[in-house]
Image (cartoon, rainbow, N blue to C red):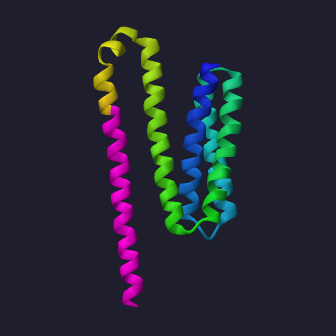
Amino acid sequence: MNQMMFTMMISMTTGLSIGVLITLTMPQQFFYSLLLSMGLSASIGLFIGLRLNFLALLEGIFTGMMSGMMGSMMVSMLSITEAKTLLLICLLLVTCTSIFCSIMFLSDQFPKLLSSFFPAIFISSLLIIFTVYYSFSHDESNFISSDIHNQHSQ
């Protein structure tokens, strides 16, 4: 059950981010971006589930496919600025999920090491999350301000 949960978490957040990112890069070809994001997300779910067991493999494939489709469809319904904000949220979810899964795998392999270094791991995880969020939100605010400036100068 834990393996299926890890597979679902990783393939869902990664597939959602891939769907948003691919549809943002190809906004005029929605059908091709939908198929590409579904295929990439399903293959990531396949590779994650392949190492665990058959049910986790099926869970990874179908969860990845569904999340890639959801990411693509959400971007097609939003404006570009809102879609870039959604990409920021998705990347934050991927970062948090990967940190959580890494900590869970480490606690299974090295229980004493994790318990002795837990405050350092927790603080470094928060710093990584804050850095990702700040760098993308700072970049997004620069993009929005240049967009507003360009609209007023025309």
Q: Is residue 57 above or below residue 106?
A: below
Q: Which residues are magenta?
A: 125-154
Query: Taking 57 as reference, is 116 left or right?
Result: left
Q: Which residue is more in the foreground, 110 or 58?
A: 110
How many numbered discs sit on the rendered protein? 0
Which quarter shows the N terminus? Answer: top right
Left or right: where does residue 32 sit relative to residue 138?
Answer: right
At 28% from the left edge and 25% from the top edge, which residue is drawn? 120
Q: Position of residue 9 (x, y in %)?
A: 58, 33
Residue pictured at 33% horizontal, 51% vertical: 134
| Image location (x, y in percent) of residue 16 | 58, 47
SS majority, magenta: helix
**Nearest to the observer: residue 74 or residue 50:** 74
Depth check: give the residue in front, 145 or 23.
145
Residue 64 colored in magenta in the image: no
Closer-to-camera residue (127/6): 127
The furthest residue to the bottom: 154
- Residue 124 vertical placement versus 104 (above, below): below
Tell me, yes or no, whether the highlighted magenta stretch contains residue 138.
yes
Splitting the image into 4 quarters, where does residue 122 fall? Answer: top left
Which residue is at 43% across, 31% downward?
A: 99
Above/below status of 134 relative to 117: below
Residue displayed at 50% across by 54% down = 87
Whole-percent x, y for residue 143 in the image: 38, 68
- Name the quadrant of the C terminus: bottom left
